[in-house]
Amino acid sequence: MAIKAIHNKAVAIESLDAKEAFMKFSQGISTAVLPRRRYVFVLALIWCSLTAMSPAASYKYKRLGSQLDAQTHTDPGIAMMGGGTDQDEAFRWLCGKGHNGDFLVLRARGTSDYNKYVNKLCQMNSVATLIVPTRNAAEQPKVAGIVRRATVIFIAGGDQSHYVNFWKGTLLGNAINTHVLAGKPIGGTSAGLAILGQYVYACLKDKPNGPDLSSREVLDNPYNERVTLVRDFLQVPLLGNILTDSHFAKRDRMGRSLGFLARIVEDGWSKDPREIAIDEKSALLVEVDGRAKVVGAGQGVYFLQVTEPPEVCQPGQPLTLRNVAAYHEPTGGTFDIRSWTGEGGEAFSISVEGGQIHTTRTGNAVY
């Protein structure tokens, strides 16, 4: 009777972390099941077992295709996607960089739905999803090993605070850096794009399922408690001194981006930070030499660079920041990240005075 009760509870909690699993396991396994004098001993045994097994069980890995890793070469490249509808052209480009190898989707929450999508779109040796939802899981050597063996890495959307809290500074984070420094391709969309640059808006103070931090909130107070910036999570070549953002025009994120850039200067991280801001349904495909092409059905990509320090960037005061150099690159245009110059787009200037945005574009257009 006691053995059966314990077995049933073990099956129910096999994918939980140790603390949560222990709480669920111990519920009901009491003197009603075991004699009182054995109760403490059994709970101690359960705790030791769960702490030993739960970190390995707290990640999920699902793979389609060959179970044997491909032996192939790769080409470096960065597929930067702005969220919304996935862009087939961007995924095909990323797959091509992997030369029919092993495509790995990384995420902290969610499902393995990308497996079928990528498997149908590309001819890869395998397509897999690795879900790493805790810091303990991100410290598992098996997790890092899966990442190291991947040919292509794609970081899905979701909540970038999970990526920062769970992965930054772990074996998993180190394995991603090793991947890109080895010349293997990487991509990301939405939250997955947000963590690719040296500077990251981390969403650490956002409420679960709450509203996005708005441009107006940041323009009115660049030191709003929700403006949580971190740096040096990943070390992606070409993306040093760069902040990345998604859903840009669609969600009116220009104002908050200007506030983030002003904070990076004011806090002493950089004198001239840059941003690559990508609209929904748009993607930027970056070659190893820095040349990049805009694809997709969205409004394209916005490239921003601070040229002078903010005049006013203080807690509780509206932002004043002048002469930010901007370049809008629509679909089909090209941009060189190394030289920070583009072809086929429009250069303009943006200033913020007392929290109000002004541009040199016709009609004071922002986007």
Image (cartoon, rainbow, N blue to C red):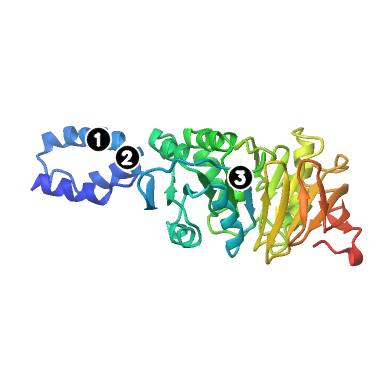
Earlier residue among tags 3 and 2: 2
Mark 1 secondary-structure assignment: helix
Mark 3 secondary-structure assignment: loop
Is 291 or 72 nearer to us in this picture? 72
Disc 3 marks a residue whose amino acid type is Ile
Which residue is labeled 1 in the image? 49
Give the residue drawn at x 32%, y 47%: 15
Task: Single out the mark in the foreground, 3 or 2.
Answer: 3
Q: Which mark is residue 191?
A: none
Is 142 or 355 nearer to us in this picture? 142
Q: Position of residue 145 (x, y in %)?
A: 42, 36
Q: Which mark is residue 195?
A: 3
Judge the density around disc 1: few (<14), some (14-19), many (≥20) Cα neighbours within 10 Å: few
Task: Single out the mark in the foreground, 1 or 3.
Answer: 3
**Cα–Cα gap, marks 3 and 2:** 27 Å
Give the residue drawn at x 11%, y 34%: 37
Would residue 362 be found to the left or right of residue 234 on screen?
right
Is 219 or 290 nearer to us in this picture? 290
Which residue is labeled 2 in the image? 54
**Cα–Cα gap, marks 1 and 3:** 35 Å
Res 363 seen here: yes
Q: Position of residue 229 (x, y in %)?
A: 66, 42
